[in-house]
Image (cartoon, grey):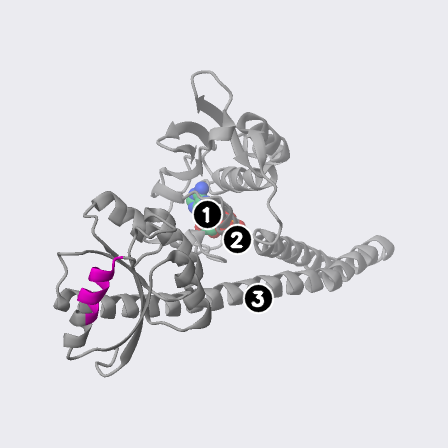
Amino acid sequence: MVSSLICFKILLVEDNLPDVIILKKQFQKLQTLSVKLTHVSTCRDAIFSLQSHDFDVILLDLSLPDSHNLDTVKTIYSHSGDIPILILTGLDDQVTAIASVREGAQDYLVKGQINLDNLQRSIRYAIERKQRLKEINILNKKLSTSNQELENYAYIVSHDLKQPLQTILASSQLILHLEKNLKEQSYQLLEFILASTNQMNKLIDNLLSYAQINKKSIEKEIVCVENIIKNVMKFLNKQIQDSKASINIQMNNNNKPIKVFYNSIQLSQILQNLMSNAIKYIPYDRTPEIQITIEKKEETWLFMVKDNGIGVKPEDQGRIFEMLERVDTDRKYSGSGIGLAICQKIVEINGGKIWVESILNKGSTFFFTIPILAIEN
Ligand code: ADP
């Protein structure tokens, strides 16, 4: 809390002298606030004062000889640093009031409607709010630095892990190839080493891919969704053939191709993960039936990947998008628990949302959105 004994340094930017005199008199009557007032009459002088002095709050009239209305707020805000701005104006206009707050002002006070109490309260609250914002900004900066460090760390570790793993893989393959008289048990152990190393290789690739999502400067372009889906299906061809999966695609855009502004690799990654899961998480006695639907929903493209698989319990539907979370407890299905975390990260950094609706043993529908941009048309 701000102590009541603190002396507030106020910059008053006001060109109307009678208003200045009234304010000065009001401040003299204050009992719980001690005020050191600096008065200037123009935007230019206000900037000069802000550059050379420290203030706790700025009281700003919108109409000055060298600046008017929102321009005044914008100019002073750009020079105010962390100092809260209170608009003090004769103009009782809600639209300007809201616009001023959007431009960075903390409050909008109308002359003639303010009394000593609410002026005092506004000043105190503005200072408190600005202080809290400053703290939140510092915490956000710390958080984003530590996220960045974590991502760099994951990237380096994954990179360094790959090299020894490749050596293990290559050596095991070489032994299998060269040693023709291996005992059955040794042969099985080597096969086991190979399978585990391959699995670890995939896991590291996924970790790398997760860590890189923010790293790569994402180059976006206009991409045709149908082409992306066709390429993903080519990539998943073996999985589709082996499982005899049927895939039905429905694009609801009045017979026009759907184009989105996205990074094509990232869109492929999302669809590949969702489609591959739709084929994978199926009871053994069922053939996968996948329905992909894309349609406009308000300001977004809504993608839906529906399957007839094992489904996800309601209590697990949130956590499957978290890193390394897997919910098939008896481990019948192989996987690393990173695919959906990758999807979520990509969708969210592109301004979309991803979620699932599911009925256990009946199937799931994974939804994700892509904002529609004017340049797509
Ligand atoms: P992985 O498939 O490699 O385990 P994912 O992040 O893609 O990792 O999925 C996380 C978990 O979510 C899976 O382990 C599985 O339990 C569940 N899951 C994902 N997709 C489906 C689906 N289509 N049907 C049922 N469960 C799913």
Alpha-carbon distance for marks 1 and 2? 15 Å
Look at the magenta stretch and give its main secondary structure: helix
- Report the amino acid beneath label 3: Glu
Up the image or down, 250 lies above or below 273; here it is: above
Residue 46 in the image: state x and y as whole percent.
39, 62
Rendered residue at 43%/17% (across/down): 254
- Looking at the rendered structure, the secondary structure element under dot 1 is helix
Alpha-carbon distance for marks 1 and 3? 20 Å
- Looking at the rendered structure, the secondary structure element under dot 2 is loop
For the record, the magenta segment spans 16-24
Judged by depth in the image, the label closer to the viewer, 3 or 2, is 3
Alpha-carbon distance for marks 3 and 2? 19 Å
Q: Residues within 10 Å of mark 2 (few under 14, many from 20)?
A: many
- Report the amino acid beneath label 1: Glu
In reply to whether residue 22 is colored magenta, the answer given is: yes
Viewer-side residue, 26 vs 283:
26
In the rendering, which numbered label is found on residue 149?
A: 3
Q: Residues within 10 Å of mark 3 (few under 14, many from 20)?
A: few
| Lower position in the chain sequence, tag 3 or tag 2 | 3
Residue indicated by mark 2:
338
